[in-house]
Image (spheres, rainbow, N blue to C red):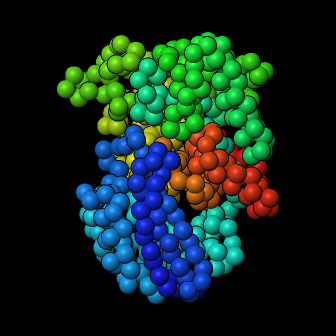
């Protein structure tokens, strides 16, 4: 049992060049756990607030001034670490200390505890059942809040090598599709600059239909059959299109509007045409009944809540009651602390809601979410495709493939 001997918070930068917070937890004056928090551009209304009004500087100030509350705690006692944070910030959405701080402190503490025990992080987070690798889910073409004007309204077109038998094969396949899509985009538009969005997906000037068509073509050019060796996914991020005052989804870049009923048909047509394995936030974050209709129509697609469920256990319980999704994103900093996130995972796994552990668009080069994805029995790990902050998670999966405790790929 290793005790926390110091805590240090500092302000650093994430992959978008925005300020964020990093936390060092030292055990017994010699073992270091260090975590830098990510943050998202597409943010749900009910997720934890990343930072207080004073920003990351205020988060660091609050943490450093409360260091003594953590000293002497058992670093592996996640519940005690969580409730110590809550003794500093008892607000509903971490508005005093910031969800990013709760994320960094709890994961750094567990990371240090794993090092003290000379064990991988996933092993101290998981139960005793057999562990498998989640399938990497990568953004190959981006738009919406993750890319600039002229790109598709749809936020992410994703690739998942659903036929892969190993983590290496899965990553290689995703990368091959990403590269082939670049070749196609260059032929389609000789002026394409190879620009990419926040998560490594290509960001061409293109409407939704063309973007989906060319993404499917990239798979087919490599000899893959959609729905077999590889599958496409879409993050619709529909809350960014939803205009409450009009009660419509407004697709500014493509020049059309959808009523709630039209949105269901719009999404359904894309799922059917492209045999999607994954459809995230197909309607806005409070449209539980509409999500229920889509889930009913497509039981073999991961109809996934992100803004809908925001890694919040009580909101997930509402979604389960209404049958509003059959899968849910797990983003630790949406919930705040790792303790909050694992409670969410327990609820999901206990109710046959398949988990997808996810990065954020503004990321760090840390790789702990690869361990969290394995430990929570996630079916997929949404981590982008290229870029150091994305590849760090994929490379960690390759390292972990050398462990005998993780056998094969998850069953989607």
321, above or below 273, in the image: below
The answer to whether 138 appears left or right of 96 in the picture is right
The answer to whether 65 appears left or right of 305 in the picture is left
Give me the residue at 53% from left, 26% from top: 203
Q: Quadrant of residue 366?
A: bottom right
Q: Quadrant of the image for the N terminus?
A: bottom right
Is any atom of residue 95 visible in this view?
A: no
Is any atom of residue 8 visible in this view?
A: yes
Q: Which residue is at the front of the view, 91 or 299?
A: 91
175, above or below 347, in the image: above
Q: How many marks?
A: 0
Q: Quadrant of the image for the C terminus?
A: top right
Picture coordinates of residue 316, whole percent (x, y): 40, 48
Picture coordinates of residue 293, whole percent (x, y): 42, 28
Give me the residue at 42% from left, 70% from top: 9
The answer to whether 218 appears left or right of 79 in the picture is right
Give me the residue at 65% from left, 35% from top: 160
Picture coordinates of residue 108, whole percent (x, y): 52, 69
Picture coordinates of residue 142, whole percent (x, y): 51, 29
The answer to whether 123 appears left or right of 45 in the picture is right
Q: Quadrant of residue 226?
A: top right
């Amino acid at each position: 049992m290793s005790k926390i001997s110091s805590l240090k918070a500092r302000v650093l930068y994430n992959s978008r060049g925005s300020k964020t917070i990093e936390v060092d937890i030292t055990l017994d004056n010699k073992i270091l756990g260090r975590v830098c928090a990510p943050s998202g551009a597409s943010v749900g209304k009910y997720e934890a607030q990343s930072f207080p009004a004073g920003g990351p500087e205020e988060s660091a100030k609050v943490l450093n001034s409360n260091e003594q509350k953590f000293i002497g705690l058992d670093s592996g006692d996640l519940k005690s670490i969580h409730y110590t944070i809550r003794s500093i910030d008892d607000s509903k959405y971490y508005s005093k200390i910031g969800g990013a701080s709760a994320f960094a402190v709890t994961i750094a503490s567990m990371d240090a505890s794993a090092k003290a025990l000379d064990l991988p992080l996933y092993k101290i987070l998981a139960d005793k059942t057999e562990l498998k690798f989640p399938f990497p889910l990568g953004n190959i073409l981006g738009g919406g809040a993750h890319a600039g004007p002229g790109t598709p309204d749809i936020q992410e077109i994703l690739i998942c090598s659903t036929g892969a038998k190993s983590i290496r094969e899965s990553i290689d396949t995703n990368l091959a599709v990403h590269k082939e899509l670049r070749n196609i985009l260059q032929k389609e538009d000789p002026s394409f600059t190879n620009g990419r969005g926040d998560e490594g997906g290509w960001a061409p000037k293109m409407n939704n239909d063309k973007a989906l068509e060319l993404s499917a073509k990239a798979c087919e050019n490599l000899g893959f059959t959609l729905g077999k060796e590889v599958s496409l996914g879409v993050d619709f991020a529909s809350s960014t299109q939803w205009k409450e005052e009009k009660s419509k989804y407004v697709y500014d870049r493509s020049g059309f509007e959808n009523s709630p009923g039209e949105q269901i048909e719009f999404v359904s047509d894309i799922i059917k045409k492209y045999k999607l394995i994954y459809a995230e936030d197909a309607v806005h974050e409070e449209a539980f009944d509409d999500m229920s209709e889509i889930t009913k129509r497509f039981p073999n697609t991961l109809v996934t809540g992100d803004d809908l469920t925001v890694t919040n256990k009580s909101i997930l319980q509402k979604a389960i009651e209404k049958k509003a999704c059959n899968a849910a994103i797990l983003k630790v900093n949406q919930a705040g602390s790792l303790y909050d996130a694992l409670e969410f995972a327990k609820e999901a796994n206990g109710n046959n809601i398949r988990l997808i552990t996810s990065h954020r668009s503004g990321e760090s080069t840390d790789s702990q979410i690869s361990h969290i994805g394995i430990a929570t029995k996630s079916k997929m790990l949404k981590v982008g495709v290229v870029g150091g902050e994305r590849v760090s998670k994929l490379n960690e999966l390759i390292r972990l493939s050398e462990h005998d405790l993780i056998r094969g790929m998850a069953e989607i």
